[in-house]
Image (cartoon, helix red, strand yellow):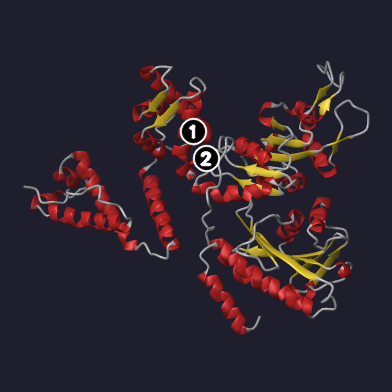
Amino acid sequence: MNQQGLLAFLDRLRKARYFEEAAMTMLREMLAAANAALAESRFASRGKILRGMAHLRPSDGYRRLALLEDAPQRGEPTITYVPSASAWRWVATRECPIAVDVPLGSVRTWQNQSVEVINEGAFSGSDSILRLERRDASHLYAVPLRSLRGTVEGMATVEAGCPPAIGHDFIFPAVSEPLQIIADIAAPYLASLPLRPAAAGAVDDLLPVIGQSMASLIEMLRVFAQQEETLLIGGPTGAGKSRLARWCHAQSIRRGGPFEVLDLLTVPEDLQMAELFGWRKGAFTGAAKDTAGCITRAFKGTLFIDEIDKLSLKAQAGMLQLLESRTYRPIGDGAREQQADVRFIVGSNVDLYEQVKLGRFREDLYYRINVLPVKILPLDERRDEIPQWARFMALRRHRESVPEGDARISAAAEQLLSEHTWPGNLRQLDNVVRRAYALALMTQGNASPEILLEERHFARALSYERGSGRRTALESMRAAATAFVEEAERFEERSLVLDLELSDAFRGIVLGTAVQRLGSRDAAFRLFGKAAQVQSRNHHKMLRRELEKVEALCKALGEESSPFAGLGEDET
C-alpha cells in the first residue's frame, strides 16, 4: 500500500460510523493485498482468494462479526460462515499471526516478525479442517486484532483455494507484513465503533420479544444456530439462556429432532456421568433397569447442558472425550461405543476462563466448548424489552384460564416496571407479573375476558421483593443520558445532529417536575436550596429561562408541546 493508498484507507476508516463499515474497509484492503501477492506468485493462474472475515471476541463471547466474499455482490454479503475456532485458539494463545495449510493441518506462526515455527499436523480439530474444506479453502491466514492496550480481542482471516500449493508456503510469507499492518491500523476503529442498528427481526413463541438492545446478538445467533459447532451461552441466572437454547434448536437443521435439557445444578456429582451417558441394569446400587441418558434421548437433536461449570472434574474428562470422539458408552455397558449424533449447547453464568485459571475447569474442555460463545445481557441492560416481556407474561398467564382473553398493563405500571432493578432478570419479572395478575383477579374476577394490570397491582407485587428495587438517582440519570445518546444516534442515521447544548434542558425538566409535584414554584426552588432567589422573586425569571430550554429540546425531538407548557407564565 503506497502513501496515497494508506491515506485513502485511513480516511475511509475515519468516516466509518459503524463496525460493519470499518470491517468491510479493512477486509477489502486485506483481500486486495492477498490478490496482489497471488498475482506475483507462481500460483497466479491456479489459485483464488476466496473471502475475508473479521470478528471481535473478548473473553465473554462474540460481539461483532463481518464477512466479505472476494466476488462482486449487491449490498452487504449475508454471513453464512463462522470463523475457525481452532484458528482463533492459536491466535488468542500465541498472540501472533498464523498460516494454515488446511489439508495437511500444519500451522506456521510468525513471532517477533522473524521467528517462524512450523507445526506439522498441529491444527487441532478435524471439524475445523472439514468445515474449511467444505468452503473450498486450502489455505488460511489469520492475524490478531489488538485493542489499544495491546490485548488480542479479535481476529481477521483470509481464506484461499489453491490445491497445487498444498505443502508449499503459498503467498503468506510475502503478504504477512502487509496484512498485519492493515489489521493494526483498523483494529482501534473496529473496537470503538458501534454495531449498525439491526432490525428487530421476526418474533415467535420461543422468542416473543426482541428489543433493539438484543437485536444484533439475535441476528448473529440466527447464523450460529445453523452451525453444528458447540454453542456456549453465557449470562446471569434467569436471563433466558434455556429459552434461547430452545430457540436456537428450532432455528437449526436439527429442528425435527428432540431437544433435551440437562441442568447440572439439579444433578449430584456422582450421578452426572450416569445422567449424560445412561446406564445398564446393575451398573451401580439403585440401577434397577436399563436407562437411556441425555445423549441417547437427544439423538439427531440438541442437548442443552446448563450450568456447565458444575460438572465435576471426572465428568469433565468424560465430556471432553465425548466431544472429541463423538462416541460414548453407557455406564456398565461392555459393548461397542455408540455414536453421539447430537448438537451441543451449553450454558453458564460464570466466567469459565476464570474457573480454568482457578483449576476448577479443564482448559482443554474449555476450548472444546468455547467455539461459538455468546453472552446474554442482564435484563437491567435490556430496559427497552421490559414492558414487552411484562405484556407477554401477563397475556400468557391470563390465557391459561381464559384462552381467548386479553391482558393489558397500564402505561403507569409499565413505567414503574421500567424504573425497577431486576437482579433476578426475566425469572424475577415473571414472578412479579404473576403476583400482580393474582392481585388484579381479586378485583376483576377469574372469568373476566379482559383484565387490566394497574400500577397499584405492581406496586404491591413489588413490595414483596427484598429491598426497594428502585434505581438510584444516579442510575436513573444515566438511563436518561443513555436515552439522549440513543436519540442522537437516530439523528445521525438521518444525517442530522442533536446538539449537545440541548441536554441543558435537564435542569428545566427537574424544576418543572418539582413545581408540578409540589404545586408551588416557591416550594420547588426552596427544595433545591434556592430560597434567596425566592425571597428576591428572581425565581420566576429563572424558571421561565430553564423551561425555554425544555421547549427547545421538545421542538428538536418533534414533540408537539412541552410537558410543562404554561408553567413558566408569570403568576398573577
Label 2 sits on a secondary structure element that is loop
Which amino acid type is shown beneath numbered disc 1? Answer: Phe
Q: Which of marks 2 and 1 is nearer the N terminus?
A: 2
The image shows residue 427 at horizontal and vertical percentages of 53, 32
Q: In this view, does 107 lie above or below 243?
A: below
Residue where numbered disc 2 is placed = 209
The image shows residue 204 at horizontal and vertical percentages of 57, 38
Toward the bottom, the furthest residue is: 3
Label 1 sits on a secondary structure element that is helix
The residue shown at (26%, 58%) is 552
The residue lying toward the viewer, choosing from 117 and 416, is: 416
Residue 355: image quadrant is top right
The image shows residue 356 at horizontal and vertical percentages of 70, 45
Residue where numbered disc 1 is placed = 392
Q: How many marks?
A: 2
Q: Is residue 519 above or below residue 196?
A: above
The quadrant in which the N terminus is found is bottom right
Does residue 6 appear to the left or right of 138 in the view shown?
Answer: left
Determine whether label 2 and label 1 are within 8 Å by CB. Answer: yes
The residue shown at (83%, 44%) is 324
